[in-house]
Amino acid sequence: MKQLEQLNFDNTFARLPATFHSSIKPTPLSRPYLVSFNTSAARLIDLSETESEREEFAQYFIGNRLLPGSEPLAMLYSGHQFGQYVQQLGDGRAILLGEINNQAGEYWDVQLKGAGPTPYSRNGDGRAVLRSSIREYLCSEAMHGLGIPTSRALCIVGSDEKVYRETVESAAVVTRISPSSVRFGSFEVFYYRKQFEQITRLADYVIAKHFPHLAKVTDKYAKFLQEVLERTAHLMAQWQAVGFSHGVMNTDNMSILGLTFDYGPFGFMENYDPGYICNHSDHRGRYAYDQQPQIALWNLSALAQALSPLVPQEQAEEILETYGDIFSARYVELMCNKLGINYAGLEDFALIRPLLEMMQASNLDYTNLFRELGNFNSAGEGNNMKLRDQFVDRTAFDAWAALYATRLSAEGCQENDRKIKMDKVNPKYILRNYLAQTAISKAEKERDFTEVDRLLSLLSRPFDDQPEMESYAATSPEWARHLEVSCSS
Ligand code: AMP
Ligand code: MG
């Protein structure tokens, strides 16, 4: 494990032509202080955990000092925001320090979010507030704990400097690390500028770095599009299965590697509600929970359009047509896992759908209900009273329970084994908005970051029963029912 000054940078993106990025130094912030440090993310970049104890640590990760070997830059991209093409976006407040090539040979982008304006900031201040930094930090690690591909987060460093949003808040910088920060919009910008040679350049770069098995195959660009589509479809299946809503699925927030990234007004659904909208600025529900899979396909079509100089339209259409089946098969498979049954095919949805409908009708917590289903007794002992009592329509529950019991006995799985298996896929703990809000309030009002650390540790093991943390599995208390989360961050 290394000291800060020894990290092994190899900045491949910085070596791409100047059209791809702008060199930019972070703008200093006064009196930085460490809010939280994530040792498991530090290991990814070979950083020794004791380095966070050094006074320089906060200086480096708020952007006041530059790590040796870094070549800070802002990446250019554009994208479709809420369905409308926006000519130019780019990192408006994210600064890529560079890529760390770790001892295992992996590359990790290290990016400061909130480190000051860049040439792409438009009218923004280039800053991020402590509140949204804590949310991103916790959620990306929660997603990782859930086994969902995501950018990671190394640390949060706060500052006393003020940031003006709806109210006055304090500034912070969250350091994200991820295998790639290239997004669909990174391709779109060159397509709409008719700089087709740059599209090839970027595709070759991404393929060489992240899809090396495609580098020498015929039709590599079509296969690349196919793989991005598969990863995206799998990601959507995981989001849907866990009840995660991203909130701003613009094409500039869609990772080329199918990672969850750019956390803003995200939310984990509590009561099962297909129309759940986590982003209070999304008045029409374009990015509602149940819209996500089809929005991802819409976004993939936008990517296909940007890649059209490389992949003929007819071929791209054939690829896009595979999305529905790939998504559905993966989603139903994941839902079968949640029920503790083996995936047999799309017809398994016949068992899943009525359960979801009953959950919706009874306003049940999606996460907790699935967790409790691990205790379902397929022999009907005690009539599964504890579960049954939660449903308004008991007759419907009895009918469903009979179907489920028949299916379970056909699979011949031991009850105990099934519970163990189900507990590995049905989380006990998710990042409920009220949990994040409690940690944020303590951090903002008292400079007490213990709750951030506690949640970080809890959510890194979301499937484990952690008896001393039992209360963290509870649904939202009354005060938090109407917490509003918007794009403001
Ligand atoms: P987002 O919705 O967070 O993906 O942001 C969309 C675009 O706006 C991205 O290009 C961001 O970099 C930029 N942006 C968002 N907030 C700010 C800010 N406070 N200052 C500068 N740019 C910003
Ligand atoms: Mg973004």
Image (spheres, rainbow, N blue to C red):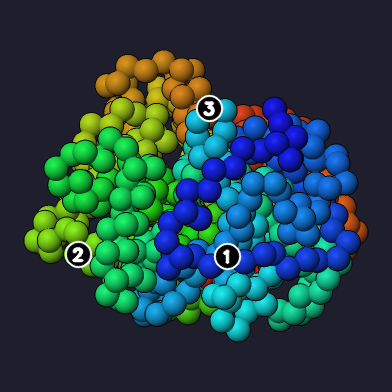
Whichever of callouts 2 and 3 sits on the residue coming sooner in the sequence is: 3
Mark 3 or mark 1: whose residue is earlier in sequence: 1
Asked which secondary structure carries label 3, the reply is: loop
Q: Is residue 107 above or below residue 22?
A: above
Q: Write down the residue under mark 2.
A: 308
- Give the left or right position of residue 251, taking residue 305 as reference: right
The structure residue drawn at horizontal position 83% and vertical position 71%, both measured from the top left corner, is 161
Disc 2 residue lies near ligand 2 with CB under 8 A: no
* Image quadrant where one finds the C terminus: bottom right
Please identify the residue farthest to the left as the structure is shown: 314
Q: Splitting the image into 4 quarters, where does residue 465 fall?
A: top right
Does the image show residue 106?
yes
Q: Residues within 10 Å of mark 1 (few under 14, many from 20)?
A: some
Q: Position of residue 400 (x, y in %)?
A: 34, 40
Residue 355 is tagged as none
Q: CA distance from mark 3 to mark 1?
A: 28 Å
Kindly give the residue lying farthest to the bottom in the view shown: 123
Q: Residue at x 19, y 59 (%)?
A: 310
Looking at the rendered image, the quarter that the N terminus falls into is top right
What residue did someone put label 1 on? Answer: 23
Residue closer to the observer: 46 or 33: 46
Residue 104 tag number: 3
Q: Which residue is painted at 46% across and 24% down in the image?
A: 421
Q: Are marks 2 and 3 in contact (CB under 8 Å)?
A: no
Q: Nearer the viewer, residue 248 or 282?
A: 248
